């Protein structure tokens, strides 16, 4: 990026010389350094100060002549200004920065082999499939995806995992909410669950359920109906979440279902394995994982 700006400066000085505004034959070194204070831009040059004694001219006048002749057809510079006795301060345009970053990514410049093929799993986003994504979810998902990309670019073999929280009280509450709206859709008066999900999407899920299964849940045992509707809502929300994430370029290598892990006994087996290795201990009525031993800032409650 310095080379692009250095070329612009050299061309501006050459134009000023040809126009008679600056009288010189040899161009001094065009040094560009990052200013100490952020508000002064991305790069600064003291070329006007270096030329002042040689040309017998005030450095600010020289700086003005240079800026006057600066032709930035490529849209590299967003702001150019004179500061202090004659420093030239430049701020790059966002368009130029994005173009340079894209070019670097395509060339894989800056890629390192710090990981040397070590496998790393990055579990991120993992929004509960009880409703659609909101902006906060999207922000966290982008953060996780950027971390995964940085690890991949530095030599790690990365697996991106979305942990699907499709078991437990929240999923049951989703099923109860759909069940209430389903009965309402079938013309019955209802009492909506006190802590149910009130969004319009629940009504849409209920309408889809009636279209798919008709009125079968009106005569079915409530717990069985809620179980089916919980699964229906969870699957529909997960599809919507996947679609939304993929629309801004975030894809996962695996989706790990909590319900499947529990059904197959994986959770219990893992806890017993960790306990056998001395990595789980009791404290304050709960079971804790010694995650500090692996770089975490504190141990985490498991059960």
Image: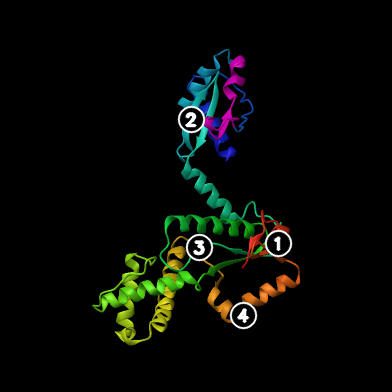
Mark identifier at residue 265 = 4
Marks 3/2 in contact by CB < 8 Å: the verdict is no
Q: Nearer the viewer, mark 3 or mark 4?
A: 4
Q: Nearer the viewer, mark 3 or mark 1?
A: 1
> Can you tell which quarter of the image residue 47 is in?
top right
Q: Position of residue 264 (x, y in %)?
A: 60, 81
In this view, the residue in front, 111 or 298, is: 298
Q: Position of residue 186 (x, y in %)?
A: 26, 79
Cα separation between marks 4 and 1: 22 Å
Cα separation between marks 2 and 1: 54 Å
Crowd band around label 1 with a 10 angstrom C-alpha radius: few (<14), some (14–19), many (20+): some
Q: Could you tell me which secondary element the residue under label 1 belongs to?
A: loop
Q: Is residue 68 magenta?
A: no
Cα separation between marks 3 and 2: 37 Å
Residue at point 41% right, 81% down? 223
Marks 4/1 in contact by CB < 8 Å: the verdict is no
Mark identifier at residue 80 = 2
Marks 4/2 in contact by CB < 8 Å: the verdict is no
Residue at point 50% right, 47% down? 98
Q: Nearer the viewer, mark 4 or mark 2?
A: 4
Residue at point 46% right, 44% down? 95
């Amino acid at each position: 990026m310095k080379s692009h700006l250095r070329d612009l400066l050299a061309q501006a000085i050459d134009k000023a010389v040809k126009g008679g505004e600056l009288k010189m034959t040899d161009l001094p070194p065009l040094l560009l350094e990052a200013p100490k204070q952020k508000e002064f831009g991305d790069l600064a040059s003291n070329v006007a100060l270096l030329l002042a004694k040689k040309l017998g001219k005030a450095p600010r006048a020289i700086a003005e002549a240079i800026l006057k002749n600066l032709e930035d057809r490529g849209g590299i510079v967003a702001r150019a200004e004179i500061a202090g006795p004659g420093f030239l301060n430049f701020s790059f345009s966002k368009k130029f920065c994005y173009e340079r970053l894209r070019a670097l990514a395509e060339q894989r410049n800056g890629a390192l082999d710090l990981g040397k093929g070590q496998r790393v799993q990055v579990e991120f986003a993992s929004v509960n499939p009880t409703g659609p994504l909101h902006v906060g979810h999207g922000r966290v998902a982008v953060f996780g995806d950027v971390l995964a990309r940085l690890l991949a670019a530095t030599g790690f073999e990365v697996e991106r995992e979305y942990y699907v929280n499709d078991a437990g009280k929240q999923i049951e509450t989703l099923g109860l909410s759909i069940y209430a709206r389903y009965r309402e859709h079938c013309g019955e008066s209802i009492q909506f669950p006190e802590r149910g999900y009130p969004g319009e999407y629940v009504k849409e899920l209920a309408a889809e359920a009636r279209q798919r299964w008709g009125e079968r849940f009106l005569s079915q045992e409530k717990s069985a109906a809620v179980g089916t509707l919980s699964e229906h809502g969870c699957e529909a929300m997960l599809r919507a979440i996947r679609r939304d994430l993929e629309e801004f370029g975030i894809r996962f290598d695996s989706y790990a279902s909590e319900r499947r892990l529990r059904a197959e006994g994986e959770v219990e087996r893992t806890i017993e394995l960790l306990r056998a290795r001395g990595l789980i201990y009791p404290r304050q009525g709960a079971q804790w994982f010694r995650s500090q031993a692996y770089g975490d800032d504190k141990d985490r409650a498991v059960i």
